[in-house]
């Protein structure tokens, strides 16, 4: 095993530069992909699959085809039977493991999600879901160089699974709206795929009767020439907002490169992502299952918590990371809690009804059904989130940790803020499951602001998120934090000082 390969572990994925750049040699090479393919085949054999059936797909990145071919070679070197799906979405690759007629023992997706064109990665699935960080780390540790080329007698064939997945989405819409062939007739939806994989969704909507004029960037192009395919990217969201306003659409949808994340905009071009997106799908689900628990990551707003409560739900904040919120929702369900949704502010949304799979396209399909019903009643998709309190101010600051033992330094900083805040206007949250969160009275209003400081999952960084319903609240809360951390060693507080001087 090459020790440096462990640096490719990113959460539950493998990611790295796949194109050499000046001063940055490629870390995710065909040799690495081949070795990981072989390691995944051995992993599946250890799970009891003597000749595992593995589906492999890729997104539109320029290095995708070469890395896919290498991964297939590695899989075949270890006796796996391989079905090459070609251009596909990450959620579709999971669906190959649970769809009749395919039922793969495992699947591999070649993607780096929203990262720049020169990066790439691999995601691994079984029918139980995505592999954990520990399991992917085990693959990297087991990854031994494998010979290039296809072995004699390799069992490899190409399959068109993306069309199967598209039909699954169509069938869900028809079933939800009464079974007619074109139930979206009269709805106008603009689609922005950002030149990732999701352009085919416009054809799905057309088959269902929707008008998709105004859609853009549907053709796969691994250089992403128009904007980054990322629902958190400001330029990307401006692009879909313009497309909706220019075309007069009822709503717009936008996907990341591999379509496990999404966001929408309403007819006015208003962005519905982050807290708004969580509020929207929560309101729809809570109308069906009153009293249900919604699991989110830790940086969601106080306004969202109030919104979920007002709609009869329970808000359960958990750690950042889509795998974390999904596993927490699974745990709650196993304990008898009614939990239909796990969702991150980044747009990763996993519904219990859909295998707790973070599938941006399934989420959008659910929202489009709701939009069609609202339009039939004379309203719009944005009606679902009337009453959501929006902060007047919001800020994120990332404090670097310079100490060699960055986890110890981070723990000391968290302890310092936890001890300091209550004596300086902060009320510690009782549901903090990550870092330290405190609410503050701002401008004479009780609990009008909140601040969360936490450790990054992997990096020597402490992200700070804060929101205020009153002007000046963010500055006041950051001042308390600055004073609390003033005596802590091993921190680069310059970003915090810059935020206070802005």
Image (cartoon, helix red, strand yellow):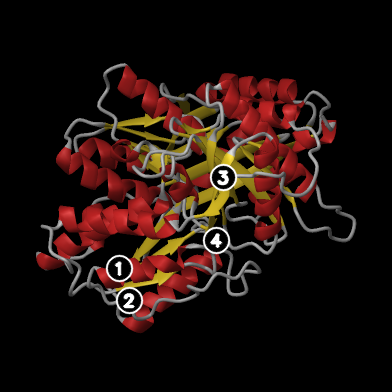
Residue 497 at x, y = what percent? 70, 45
Residue 366 vs residue 356: left or right?
Answer: left
Query: Front-most of 400 and 10?
Result: 10
Choose between 82 and 461: the one closer to the eye.
82
N-terminal-most mark, 3 or 2: 3
Q: Which residue is mark 1?
A: 205
Cα distance in 3D space between marks 1 and 4: 24 Å
Say whether disc 4 or disc 2 marks the residue closer to the N-terminus.
2
Do the residues under discs 1 and 2 have CB atoms within 8 angstroms? yes
| The N terminus, quarter of image | top right
Q: Secondary structure at mark 3?
A: strand
Is 302 displayed left or right of 452 in the figure?
left
Q: Residue 201: x, y in percent?
A: 38, 65
| Residue at position x 72%, y 32% in the image | 140
Pick the quarter of the image with the C terminus. bottom right
Tell me what residue is drawn at x 41 percent, y 21 percent: 430
Q: Position of residue 367 (x, y in %)?
A: 28, 56
User: Can you identify the residue that label 4 sits on?
Assistant: 233
Question: Which of the two discs, 1 and 4, labels the residue nearer the N terminus?
Answer: 1
Write down the quadrant of residue 454 in the picture.
top right
- Residue 368: name its quadrant: bottom left
């Amino acid at each position: 095993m090459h020790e440096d390969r462990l640096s490719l572990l990113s959460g539950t994925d493998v990611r790295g530069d796949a194109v050499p750049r000046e001063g940055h040699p490629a870390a995710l090479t065909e040799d690495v992909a081949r070795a990981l393919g072989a390691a995944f085949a051995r992993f599946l054999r250890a799970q009891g699959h003597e000749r595992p059936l593995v589906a492999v797909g890729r997104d539109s990145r320029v290095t995708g085809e070469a890395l896919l071919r290498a991964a297939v070679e590695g899989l075949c070197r270890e006796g796996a039977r391989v079905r090459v799906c070609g251009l596909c979405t990450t959620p579709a690759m999971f669906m190959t493991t649970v769809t009749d007629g395919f039922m793969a023992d495992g699947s591999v997706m070649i993607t780096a999600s929203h990262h720049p064109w020169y990066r790439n990665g691999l995601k691994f699935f079984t029918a139980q879901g995505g592999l954990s960080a520990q399991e992917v780390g085990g693959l990297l540790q087991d990854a031994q160089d494998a010979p290039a080329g296809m072995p004699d007698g390799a069992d490899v064939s190409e399959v068109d699974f993306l069309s199967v997945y598209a039909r699954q989405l169509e069938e869900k819409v028809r079933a939800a709206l009464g079974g007619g062939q074109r139930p979206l007739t009269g709805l106008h939806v603009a689609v922005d795929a950002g030149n990732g994989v999701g352009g085919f969704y416009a054809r799905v909507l057309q088959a269902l009767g929707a008008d998709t004029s105004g859609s853009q960037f549907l053709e796969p192009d691994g250089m992403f020439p128009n904007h980054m395919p990322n629902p958190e990217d400001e330029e990307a969201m401006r692009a879909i907002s313009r497309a909706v306003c220019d075309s007069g659409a009822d709503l717009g949808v936008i996907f990341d490169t591999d379509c496990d994340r999404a966001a929408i905009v309403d007819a006015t071009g208003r962005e519905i992502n982050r807290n708004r997106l969580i509020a929207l799908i929560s309101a729809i689900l809570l109308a069906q299952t009153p009293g249900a628990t919604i699991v989110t990551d830790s940086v969601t707003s106080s306004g969202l918590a109030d919104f979920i409560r007002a709609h009869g739900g329970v808000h359960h904040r958990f750690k950042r990371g889509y795998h974390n919120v999904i596993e927490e929702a699974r745990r709650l369900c196993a304990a008898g809690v009614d939990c239909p949704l796990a969702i991150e502010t980044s747009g990763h949304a996993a519904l219990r009804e859909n295998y707790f799979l973070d599938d941006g396209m399934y989420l959008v399909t659910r929202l489009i059904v709701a939009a069609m019903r609202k339009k039939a009643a004379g309203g719009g998709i944005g009606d679902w989130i009337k009453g959501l309190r929006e902060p007047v101010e919001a800020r994120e600051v990332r404090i670097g940790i310079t100490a060699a033992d960055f986890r110890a330094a981070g723990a000391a900083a968290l302890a310092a803020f936890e001890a300091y805040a209550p004596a300086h206007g902060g009320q510690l949250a009782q549901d903090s499951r990550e870092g330290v969160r405190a609410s503050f009275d701002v401008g004479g209003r009780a609990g009008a602001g909140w601040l969360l400081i936490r450790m990054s999952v992997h990096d020597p960084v402490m992200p700070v998120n804060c929101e205020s319903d009153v002007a000046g609240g963010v500055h006041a809360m950051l001042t308390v934090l600055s004073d609390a951390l003033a005596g802590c060693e091993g921190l680069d507080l310059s970003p915090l000082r810059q935020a206070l001087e802005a």
